[in-house]
Image: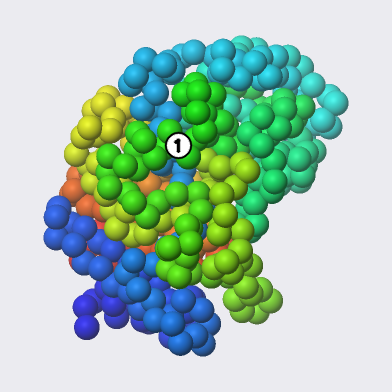
Amino acid sequence: MSTLTALLEKHVAEGAFPGAVALVDRAGEVEVAAVGSTEPAGSAPMRTDALFRLSSVTKPVTAAAVLALVDDGVLALDAPIARWLPELASPVVVRTPTSEVDDVVPAVRPITVEDVLSSRSGWGMGADFTAPALQPLFADVAVYNGGPRRAVSPDEWVAALAGVPLLRQPGEAFLYNAASDLQGVLVARAAGRPLPEFLAERILAPLGMTDTGFFAPAAARHRLTPYYRTGDGGRPVLADASDGAWATPPEFPSGAGGLVSTAADWLAFGRMLLAGGGTVLSPESVRLMTADHLTADQRAEGSLFLQGQGWGYGGSVDVDSTEPWNVPGRYGWVGGTGTAAHIVPATGTVTVILTPCGLSGPAFTAWMRDFWTYAVTA
């Protein structure tokens, strides 16, 4: 039994998840483990090619699509997004983060492509989930929270977003999640075709990511694991079955959390980043994507989501080594459906762990910390 298998089986025995797939690629030496089953007390063994809902591990892939358009000269980092999203040409901002939604001031400058890539657009989740300006974002604009997806078109989504005031001025603060959905709509508008089509053509197909998409097609559906949320007492409760919301194409392809994929496919994506972009991205785009763009104050304010990290484009960047798994320069992210994927440029390492059980909050779990520690220190 491999050490990685033993680590995962320990957490299966402790009830963290019924099964998992994990992968560690250390400069080309790959260790893969699939343990447990796809469901609690189930008889279907976990398989290495199992499909999982990536949740927020989607975010780096979406950011790469934006940067592909930057490389093409279609988008520019300093360009206002209103050129492609005219609905967002005149945003207003709540006077203070706790102000009511009608207590607003004009934005001091336009929202740029770089603001959206770095999650500093002004829309998104901060430390205070009760802020009045967040409530319409949750109620009218949120399309993905680990559960079934809402039936709303990208155009309808942008129209709804235009009616929500910014929580902070453009560029002022790191705010989580909404910017990645905004990236997905921006890609579709700038490319002139739906996000799934552009993503498949420019990112997925060149990398051989044949199992990645916004739903599980019929031929692959037997490999899609059910998804469980955490219920009372930590018990898993079925939230989406294999023939549920991810069995058909969504009306809104969520750039923040809509993809399904496998460990092998994300490995291909991670290797592309480690190789400087290959035929997919320019080295400069990869450098920008995997570099921290936040100030120290912005990192501190975003510490509910960032624990020893800054933020690049679509993922976190470790900036200190206060934890054994926290390696400066490590880039990637975690998903609320129980997923995580990272690269460590200094050592040429890719790490992926996929489970069918959702996280109960933004804090990193014990099993993630154990896996990361193993991956970067073993």
Which residue is drawn at the image coordinates 39% and 76% (left, top)? 46
Rendered view: 59 above or below 367: above
Q: Residue furthest front?
A: 219
Which residue is drawn at the image coordinates 34% and 19% (left, top)? 72
Report the front residue among 298 and 141: 141
Q: Is residue 305 visible?
A: no
Q: Which residue is mark 1?
A: 197
Rendered view: 176 above or below 182: below
Q: How many marks?
A: 1
Could you tell me which quadrant the N terminus lies in? bottom left
User: What is the x, y in percent for residue 313?
Assistant: 42, 34
User: What is the x, y in percent for residue 259?
Assistant: 48, 50
**Which color scheme did the rendering employ for the protein?**
rainbow
Could you tell me which quadrant the C terminus lies in? bottom left
The reply, left or right, for residue 29 in relation to residue 296 is left
Which residue is drawn at the image coordinates 21% and 58% (left, top)? 25
User: What is the x, y in percent for residue 280?
Assistant: 28, 33
Which residue is drawn at the image coordinates 29% and 72% (left, top)? 33
The reply, left or right, for residue 376 in relation to residue 261 is left
**Helix, strand or loop at disc 1?**
helix
Rendered view: 229 above or below 292: below
Q: Quadrant of residue 177?
A: top right
Q: Quadrant of residue 6?
A: bottom left
Report the front residue among 285 and 294: 285
Q: Quadrant of residue 377?
A: bottom left
Q: Alpha-carbon neighbours of circle 1 within 10 Å: few (<14), some, or many (≥20)?
A: few
Q: Is residue 100 visible?
A: yes
Kindly identify the amino acid type of the residue bearing the numbered disc 1: Glu
The reply, left or right, for residue 175 in relation to residue 261 is right
Report the front residue among 164 and 62: 62
User: What is the x, y in percent for residue 347?
Assistant: 18, 49
